[in-house]
Amino acid sequence: MTDDLFLDEEFDDVDADCDGEAADEAAAPEPEFTSVYEFVETHLVYLYARKVAHKQDRRWCPRWFEHPEAVSRLEALWRAYESLRLDPGTGMSVWWRDHADHHMSALFATDGPFEGCSVDRGHSPDLTAESLPTEEMDDLNLRMAMSTLAPETVS
Ligand SMILES: [Zn+2]
């Protein structure tokens, strides 16, 4: 009798684990796109259609994936899209207002990451933006204040 009870408890635990995994899968639906590249090339460029050829006030680079800032912004845009599309109410409006318009304006800006490129001339690696200049910070107290590490590990 004792052995039977013990076995029943084991089976209950197995069922609980299975139910837990099923609940996790239901909570995280499959993304519509498998990568930022797929999101941009098969969706965003058609959805966010703009006249970009022969434009002095708007930049776009056909090799957008060569620009780290563009990749980072577009990946953020893709991830926001995957999350907000699940909200049937205001999700897409929030995506357009807070994410798409914001990041696409930064990318289209004439002094943005595509400054040296154009649709007409293509990607210009020699004219792409350079890293911002910085100087080494020698104030240890300030470095500690800016760090999440324990003070003794900051160097
Ligand atoms: Zn470019």
Image: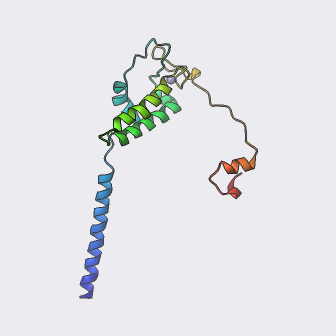
Task: Name the side, left or right, on which 50 lies relative to 140.
Answer: left
The quadrant holding residue 32 is top left
The residue at the far top in this view is 54
- Count of numbered circles in the view: 0
Tell me which residue sits at (47%, 25%) in the image: 105
Task: Name the side, left or right, on which 134 lies relative to 87.
Answer: right
Task: Indicate how the structure is coloured in the image.
Answer: rainbow
- Location of the N terminus by quadrant is bottom left
Tell me which residue sits at (27%, 87%) in the image: 2
Task: Name the side, left or right, on which 131 lies relative to 91.
Answer: right
Q: Position of residue 104 (x, y in %)?
A: 45, 27
Location of residue 3 with respect to 127 vertically, above or below: below
Query: Quick one: 127 or 111, which is closer to the camera?
Result: 111
The residue at the far front in this view is 89
Location of residue 1 with respect to 8 vertically, above or below: below
Task: Name the side, left or right, on which 64 lies relative to 12.
Answer: right
Query: Quick one: 46 or 126, which is closer to the camera?
Result: 46
Tell me which residue sits at (68%, 56%) in the image: 153
Tell me which residue sits at (33%, 56%) in the image: 24
Q: Position of residue 99 (x, y in %)?
A: 43, 34
Query: Quick one: 87 or 127, which is closer to the camera?
Result: 87
The residue at the far right in this view is 138
